[in-house]
Image: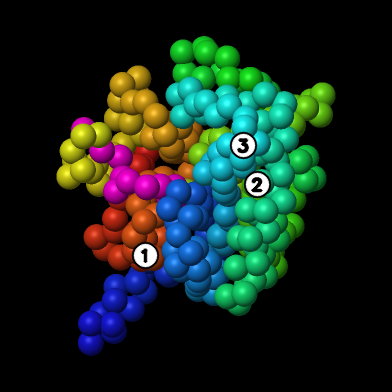
């Protein structure tokens, strides 16, 4: 009966989300732990089977760092962004496009849905311009997405689950590293997705980063904007991406603990949910 209750609880959410687009930023422990990798693939396949249109956007920071360290390359972050010169971008593209992206696609395929892996270069999906870290500090070839060509995504998502690696190029064709949180937010805005979900390694947005119990379960976009100047590290680009997504027409943005098994389904299909949900001011 408990299982029946869970199914009945999920029913109105499945009905509400049917036919809608959900953009999922995949990263952190959910990408690193072998068990969680398999569960994530199953969850995404389930979303497709019950009538949603999932779009996966991924980074691969730990893998990039691992390969850079093997090559004795310096690893540096400013404001949650990887400092990226040309050799760093070259390694990032090799790792994200050639390894991580294909691993995700193969797992989703194996669990029963056809997925297609692409990156920001494919079909000129992302056009970027060089950006700086918060405060204006130079971080090299890090790109801010100025345009997403959704025609490619609409075409793919009719029959497949798109899996997008977060790299892109500027007008001159120079490759840039793109923060995966920003990429997910930009894709969600361009698609006018119903939801964008960020899988991370904390329980949600913490009012007090030193207090793991201070999770904000729900907040308005304007409240998040007011708090952004005081936020640093990897949570800042996630919250900024949430705010930008809401301002761009996305109905809800979620920050969810990817270390929890099936956290994606729990957030989408249960009354209590987990993590932080961000919505428009009105």
**Badge number at residue 68:** 3
Q: Which residue lies under the disc numbered 2? A: 96
Mark 1, other Cα within 10 Å: few <14 / some 14–19 / many ≥20: some
Q: Is residue 201 magenta?
A: yes
How is the rendered protein coloured?
Answer: rainbow
N-term-proximal mark, 1 vs 2: 2
Residue 153 position (above or below residue 77): below
Q: Nearer the viewer, residue 14 or 94?
A: 94
Q: Report the mark closest to the observer, 3 or 1.
A: 3
Q: Is residue 165 magenta?
A: no
- Mark 2, secondary structure of its residue: helix
Mark 3, other Cα within 10 Å: few <14 / some 14–19 / many ≥20: some
**Badge number at residue 146:** none
N-term-proximal mark, 3 vs 1: 3
Give the distance between the C-alpha atoms of the residues marked 3 and 2, in whole angstroms: 13 Å
| Residue 207 in sight | no
The quadrant the C terminus occupies is top left
**Badge number at residue 261:** 1
- Mark 3, secondary structure of its residue: helix
Q: Quadrant of residue 266?
A: bottom left
Q: Is 269 on the left-hand or right-hand side of 184?
A: left
The percent position of residue 241, horizontal first and vertical second, equals 47, 35
The residue sitting at 45% across, 67% down in the picture is: 35
The answer to whether mark 3 and mark 1 are in CB contact below 8 A is no
The percent position of residue 120, horizontal first and vertical second, equals 71, 41
| Residue 263 in sight | yes
Q: Which residues are magenta?
A: 197-208
N-term-proximal mark, 3 vs 2: 3
């Amino acid at each position: 009966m408990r299982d029946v209750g869970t199914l009945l609880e999920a029913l109105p959410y499945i009905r509400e989300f049917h036919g809608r687009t959900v953009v999922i930023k995949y990263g952190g422990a959910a990408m690193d732990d072998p068990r969680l990798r398999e569960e994530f693939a199953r969850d995404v396949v389930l979303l497709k089977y019950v009538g949603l249109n999932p779009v996966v956007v991924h980074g691969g920071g730990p893998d990039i760092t691992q390969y850079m360290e093997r090559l004795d390359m310096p690893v540096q972050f400013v404001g949650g962004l990887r400092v990226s010169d040309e050799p760093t971008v070259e390694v990032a593209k090799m790792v994200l496009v050639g390894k991580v992206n294909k691993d995700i696609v193969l797992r989703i395929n194996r669990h029963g849905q056809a997925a297609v892996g692409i990156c920001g270069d494919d079909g000129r999906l992302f056009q970027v311009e060089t950006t700086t870290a918060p405060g204006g500090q130079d971080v090299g070839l890090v790109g801010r997405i100025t345009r997403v060509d959704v025609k490619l995504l609409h075409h793919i998502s009719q029959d497949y689950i798109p899996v997008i690696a977060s790299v892109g190029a500027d007008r001159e064709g120079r490759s840039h590293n793109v923060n995966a949180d920003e990429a997910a937010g930009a894709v969600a805005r361009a698609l006018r997705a119903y939801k964008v979900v960020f899988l991370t390694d904390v329980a949600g947005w913490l009012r007090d980063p030193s207090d793991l119990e201070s999770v904000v379960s729900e907040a308005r976009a304007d409240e998040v904007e007011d708090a952004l100047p005081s936020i640093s590290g990897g949570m800042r680009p996630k919250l900024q991406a949430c705010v930008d997504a809401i301002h761009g027409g996305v109905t809800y943005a979620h920050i969810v603990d990817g270390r929890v098994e099936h956290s994606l389904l729990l957030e989408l299909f249960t009354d209590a949910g987990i993590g932080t949900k961000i919505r428009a001011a009105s």
